[in-house]
Amino acid sequence: MRRSGSCRPGAAQPGLRRAAALAAVTVTIAGCGAAASGATGPGSASPASGHPSSASAQPTASPEASVRHLGSARIMIVGDSITEGSSGDYTWQYWLYKHLRADGVTARMVGPYHWLYNNVTRHEGSESYANPGFEHANDANWGMTLFREKKAIGAKVAKYRPDYLLVILGLDDIYWYGIPQPTMAANLADFIAAARHARPDIRIVFGLIPPNIHRQTNPVFAGKVATFNRSISATAAQLSTTSSPITVAQDEAGINVAADLWDGTHPNANGEIKIAAAFADVLAGRFGVGDAYPTPFPVMPIGPLTRPSLTITPSRTAGEAKLSWTLAPGADTYRIFQKDETQGQAKFKELPLPLTPAQDPWTAGLLNPGDIYYFKLQACKGTDCGAFSNVVSVTAP
């Protein structure tokens, strides 16, 4: 599994079809990077082990904290591909930003990055947000690791001056590099120390590593993630101070791997909302920034939202026609549907194999010469299938 495919495998596809597709999709976690040598530096501080409840990691709000940033907040979101998102996504930053603005909070999102990862071309720099109408700036990048970010976060905090860090990190460290738990805990403490060195009164909200398909299928990996999640809560409880409080968002709560993740690891719109809501609830309850996220959560369409434009032309070869379509952001496959009106077919039939963007244009064969055919396609991202194209017709040559 490569970095560029950090997880690659409208209307949702419910039921057995979706479950089977999710089980079959090949997923990776959150990108690769350089080797993990030097993951801890000299003098790394490792907090004592412990398994406190989530409540123990979330101290009650102080009046001073609630008042200080009630009207405005500079927020830097820090994370890997789960946070950055990829082509066609809203991102959980979008949902959090929109929520805070709706609550009257002047939320200023800051950081060095302002784009998505293109999961089709496997390059950074995509601007194909599902809705670009929000502040994109953050410190989230495909493949980001805790062991590297602990060395970089100080300079970023000094430059962008956030009041709050909202952080989900550690999945890549565990999955790709196999960093042991004591080192993970030490790196977490180093990250906090570096951020505080740049800004002594920084407020930090750590997210837990959300569920994913690997935690369901690999008990050893699941145990490592569970241990690190407990370490996050323990570290927050031990290192939180009055001047620089640290707390934990329960962002893993309610995540359904089959329904909320488009490839078994990365969130779709409904997963993004659940993550955003967890951070919003902490900002509201601990710091008085905005209100708790309203429930019940909205149920959003999943899969690519952009409708492909399909065209068809008869081929010079008997029984063939050529289909071509515009690409939908984030769509890594396209399902093809056809029906033969001349033979009285009333419903579209899906062809056996989906097509990739590289197969555009594609030749449909085995058509009955002289028959009138109708075609449409549906754009899919991982196991999430969304927007349908227009319907086109052709008389088979």
Image (cartoon, rainbow, N blue to C red):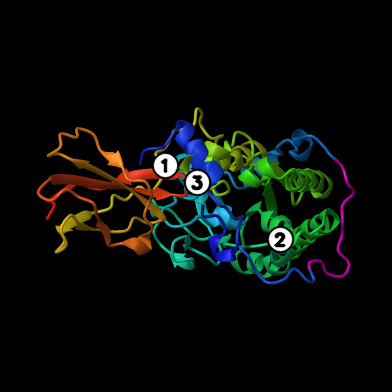
Q: Are marks 1 and 3 in contact (CB under 8 Å)?
A: yes
The amino acid pointed to by label 1 is Ile
Badge 2, how many Cα within 10 Å: few under 14, some, many 20+? many
Q: CA distance from mark 1 to mark 3?
A: 8 Å
In the picture, the disc for residue 262 is 3
What's the amino acid at mark 3?
Answer: Trp
Residue at 51% from the left image edge and 36% from the top image edge = 19
Span highlighted in magenta in the image: 39-50
Could you classify mark 1 by the number of other residues whose Cα lies within 10 Å: few (under 14), some (14-19), or many (20 or more)? many
Q: CA distance from mark 2 to mark 3?
A: 24 Å
Tag in front: 2 or 3: 3
Predominant secondary structure in magenta? loop
Dot 1 falls on a residue whose secondary structure is loop
Q: CA distance from mark 1 to mark 2?
A: 30 Å
Magenta span has 48? yes
Q: Secondary structure at mark 3?
A: loop
Q: Which residue is mark 2?
A: 146
